Amino acid sequence: MSAQRPTRVPARSQSPVRPQSRWQNWARTETSTPALTVAPSSPEQVVLAVQRARETGHTVKPIGASHSFTAIGATDGIRIDLDRMRGLVSADLARGRVTLRGGTRLWELPAILGPLGLALPNMGDIDRQTITGATQTGTHGTGLGHGGIATGIVALELVTGLGETLRIDADHHPELLHAAALGLGALGVITELTLQCVPRFLLEAVEAPAQLDEVLDGYSARARAADHFEFFWFPHTRSVRTKTNTRLPLDHGSEPLGAVSRFIDEELANNLAFGACVGVGALAPGATPAINRFVETLSSRRRYVDESHRVFVTNRRVRFREMEYSVPLDAVPEVMRELGALIERRDYRVSFPIEVRAAPADPLLLSTAHGRDSGYIAVHRYHRDRDLGYFRDAEAILAAHDGRPHWGKMHTQDAAALRERYPGFASFGAIRDRLDPDRVFANDYLTRVLGA
């Protein structure tokens, strides 16, 4: 694409233009240098930016919080920074729906939804992302009764690759919703979206140690019995930490963690102490198994009841790299045992835990849970660890079990492989041809995973 600078538009309609600067994602795994960054404050300014890109031969890439581990947000064309397009547009309290501007951050939602008596049905454990970045990459939590955040989208407004604004909902182009709700940013820039919410609720959180083999033997039944269930396994140990959350009405009454207890558990233990442990492991990998076994001895049981978002979300300050795949739910025990055997056989020293979650089947064309109840297995490495093949070998196991990689996390799959794993892959491609025929929103990552 040409590096020609776009012609200036009249000041009254122009988005603020920011100096060219190098972009880097949160995990420090990807960088790029856009030719130009604009920061629109209205859908009309997004339209102008896309139209100008078409005229000058640039590609366009909207960017949110840069929390994806992949290069899905990288561009050497025009970057659209959505930070000035945040907040509530409207609320339909009768139906429990809210319309949000595309750059709204997940951490802002409790202050928006709470006064309306609403909440998201489910959340992941990180809330730094924008609502569009989270939904476009398939961010999910855990719990077989509650899908990923994108499954709650009932309407959206999209600026297409033709520079046109498209309304997509039950009455306008409904055939596009299952593609656009989780579209990898390949179909356009989402300026607004409408989410189906639920009444505010509490979660009873129970965290407890358990034996790995016991949890794996009963995994499917346990995942189906709980509202929200997940577990973490530190390699080189034989036990796990389980997290079981049960949904309760607001009038049940909360029993939150005290400020001191929360600080000790989440800041001192989960961030400061854990950061020190993985830092030592990076400098002296041979110490990692002993460190993990020491951490295992510190695992204890705790219970509390609090507003849903305070239970779902965990503050994570230790920087890491992550790869996550969905596999058929019943395959989780076998996959986990194969990963354990791999780590032992290859003598990998892995300081970060493997996280296991679940999500129900959904109809979104590129959802990692499309058409099947799914288990999610996430492998991590401290960002300073030297990767000696752990991700590569773990990915081979995950992919061999009909695995589908999380779109915002590290993986090496391409369109040829992914086409076989997504029944709706061709349908999505046809919609992409319709909405972005000139590939205005393309970048190297999208070309690899979706094709040219």
Image: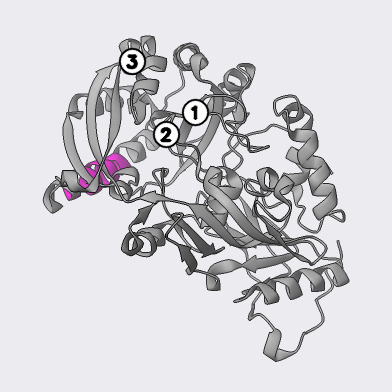
Residue located farthest toward the front when viewing the structure as drawn = 94
Q: Judge whether 345 appears above or below 255 on screen.
A: above
Q: Residues within 10 Å of mark 1 (few under 14, many from 20)?
A: many
Say if residue 361 shows up in the picture. Answer: yes
The residue identified by callout 2 is 142
**61 or 436: nearer the eye?**
436
Say what amino acid the circle numbered 3 marks.
Answer: Val
For label 1, the residue is: 376
Q: Are marks 1 and 3 in contact (CB under 8 Å)?
A: no
Which region of the structure is painted magenta?
263-276
What amino acid type is highlighted by mark number 1? Tyr
Q: Amino acid at mark 2?
A: Thr
Q: Earlier in the sequence, mark 1 or mark 2?
A: 2
Q: In the figure, 258 relative to 397: above or below?
A: below
Q: Which residue is mark 3?
A: 215
In x, y percent, where is residue 385?
A: 46, 37
Q: Residue at x 63, y 45 (%)?
A: 182
Assess whether residue 155 is covered by the magenta stretch: no
Spatial CA span between label 1 and label 3: 15 Å
Instruction: Say which element carries label 1.
Output: strand
115 sits to left or right of 196: left
Disc 2: CA contacts within 10 A as few (<14), some (14-19) or many (>=20): many
